[in-house]
Image (spheres, helix red, strand yellow):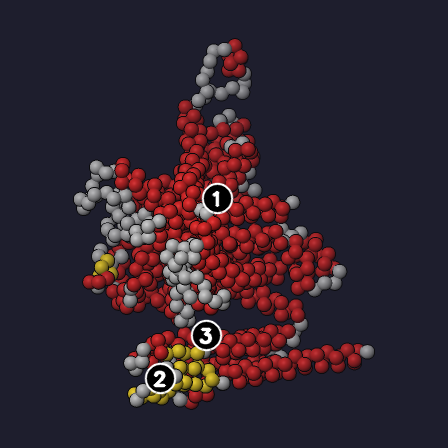
Amino acid sequence: MDMFLEKKEFLNQNKKFFLIILLSILMLICFLLPYVQIIINQDNFCVTSLDILMNSKLHVTNAGSEADINFPNVMRISVFLAVLSPLAGVLFILLKKRILAAESFVIGAITPILSLITVSDLKRQIVDLNISSNRVYIGFIWPFFLTLIFGIACAIFSVWLNGGEKLAEAVFFCFASISVGLVFLITLYMIISGLPAIIEVGIFNFLFGFEWDPSCGKYGILYLILASLFGTFGAVIIGVPVGVLTAVFLSEIASKKIGFFVRPIVELLAGIPSVIYGFFGMMIIVPFIRNVFSDFRTFSQKPVVGDSLLAVMLVLAIMVLPTIISTAETAIRAIPKSYKEASLGLGATHIQTIFKVTLPAARSGILSGIVLGVGRAIGETMAVIMVAGNIVNFPELLGSVRLLTTGIAIDMAYSSGLFRQSLFGIGLVLFVFIMIVNISFMKISKRGVQIDATNR
Amino acid sequence: MQQIDKTESDVRKNISLYSKRVRKSDVVLKMLIYFSALLTVGFFILLIAYIIVNGAGYISLDFLLSSAESDGLLPIIINTLYVEFFTLIFAIPIGIGAAIYLTQYVKQGKFVKLIRFSTETLAGIPSILFGLFGYAIFCVLFGLGSSIIAGCLTMIICVLPGIIRTTEEALLTVPNSYKNGALALGAGKFRTIFEIVLPCAVPGILTSVILAVGRIMGESAAFLLTIGTGTKMPKEVFSHIFSSGRTLTLHLYYMSGNGSVPDAMKICFAIATILLILIFVLNVLAKLLAKKFIH
């Protein structure tokens, strides 16, 4: 009986094993068949992976003109990897290292993405040959797609050799690591795409230059940075007292009934799209500022039009309110009842207890709410873009300003060359700010947890 | 403010041990607390009332279903549905899978810390940076151009941390005894997860999906850089995802700065009203589900 079972097991394993080998051969075949198809007008240039490996250029003839198109190195590397890794996968299977085998199959399957990246490069080379880009079509989807499918199938089968449980774990592991990969990729890409402009302009000139005038080649973003910082600062100054006091109201003073009505309002405020806040600011806050301050002038003696830093601050203050309220309320509710009872027992009034005991005890939670709000405010784009006026000025309360975020959003559509690169540079600066805020938030909230733990 | 009248009962109260002098600072602070709560609520009512009063009159079936190219709303609504569908279809499995891994397979260790760190980081990155990233990767590098699919791919990154976090909370509330019971009966880990843990957490997972729907509907900065400005009706069901198409929020943004369309403001108010109503409905739904989920 035992013998029989073992034999069955062996056969079962071997079935999967042969399936894997078959699939990896299919994967290779798919990859080696016409890999990139360049269609110019009516002429087809089918390029197989072997061609790409063997030759470094493609000879193109079109309407009498002849030229060579170089294959980008990335493309050749990806072809090389994509042929190598299924073979490595089979080898690993034979060595019974199934997880490694699965990894190499996955690598083999996704390497065509690398060559996807180079398609625009190929297209540019063809356009350089005086062939209009409308007449060029580069097909790559089918081989890419099939390799991907076979590669993933190989990986699944090779992990399955260890049984279904391991397979499930591996799949969930992949899903979980996607977010890690994304953060890594975003960080990498922000740096890669942002640094060239900063280096070309010069770090000092970029960060501390006063003038932002891309048409004259002036790329100083100091005013943008200052506007972002002032706007966020103003939002915090206005939003924090209101938010914290509302949180106090919700957690300490409001009866259950009132809380039942007010809490959903705070949640709804958090869910309202930023465009609606921007629209509201545009229709109500901006005209309000224009009317109230109509007798004032900005430092540069321009009339007050309403689109201003003040409007930005007010809109941002409203937008950070829900964040601050909900975090502060949770923090206040987490304070042990004994604290309050002790204070009340000593004869302090309710309000004294709130301000002398409860709030100081909840300060790390409240602080993390504020930091979260700062992160929201500094990254907000759409609401700000509708009320800021978007002229690059020294940020003054009643003058129109351009912030880091709006700088990116406005110019992206029609910029090119160094101008576009400098926008990615702004993105990098914003990213650094956000990361500082994020990491300090994590530090503060972790410390808060520790303090709470020691308190109990 | 409590006035101290010299009535009989009040005098008696003042004598008692528990009576306290009314401190002026207490009154001021209490007023401040009430004032800020009132400010929050009042602002909310002002916003809702202003938009709905101005917008509700414009909404009609004809208006919603007009497919004219410049100011028709139907193509925009269809684009929004496309974005919702194609984002969620990718984001939900990934998010749930990640949450399952974090709650059921590994609970401690360096890798889990790394995943937690990166989801928190992703949650904190503003959507304009996602838009920038999506533009550089999906539109330019992958050659997708400004298209709905590029917007969807960008949006997946935006909603992923939220889905992971809410689903994780939902999965953690499933009592361990259920799991142990299933395991003791001989079910494998995978089977336990799919037949015991996930069904028990369905309301919580639905809540996370609803929150993601709301987030996608309200998003605009990430789409601004990736999805383009198209307002055309889809010609084909599938190939439409490769063409550009603005969503409701973007349409509101473009219309608000557009003087050439005669009824621009009308359309803005109408879209804002629609968005508010949808957000409200989604919030109520999430609330109801959460209530069901707790009991």
Circle 1: element type: helix
Which badge, 1 or 3, is on the more N-terminal residue? 3
The amino acid beneath tag 1 is: Leu
Q: Is residue A186 visible?
A: no
- Give the x, y percent position of residue A327: 48, 44
| Foreground of the two, A425 or A337 | A425
- Point 66% across, 61% down: residue: B194
Q: Nearer the viewer, mark 1 or mark 3?
A: 1
Relative height, residue B128 to residue A181 (above, below) = above
Judge from the rendering whether residue A398 lies leftward or rightward of residue A260; answer left or right: left
- Point 72% across, 60% down: residue: B183
Mark 2 vs 3: CB contact within 8 A: no
Which badge, 1 or 2, is on the more N-terminal residue? 2
The amino acid beneath tag 2 is: Asn
In the picture as drawn, the residue positioned furthest to the right comes out as: A1
Relative height, residue A172 to residue B33 (above, below) = below
Tell me the CA gap for discs 1 and 3: 41 Å
Residue at the spot of label 1: A268
Judge from the rendering whether residue A239 lies leftward or rightward of residue B170; answer left or right: left
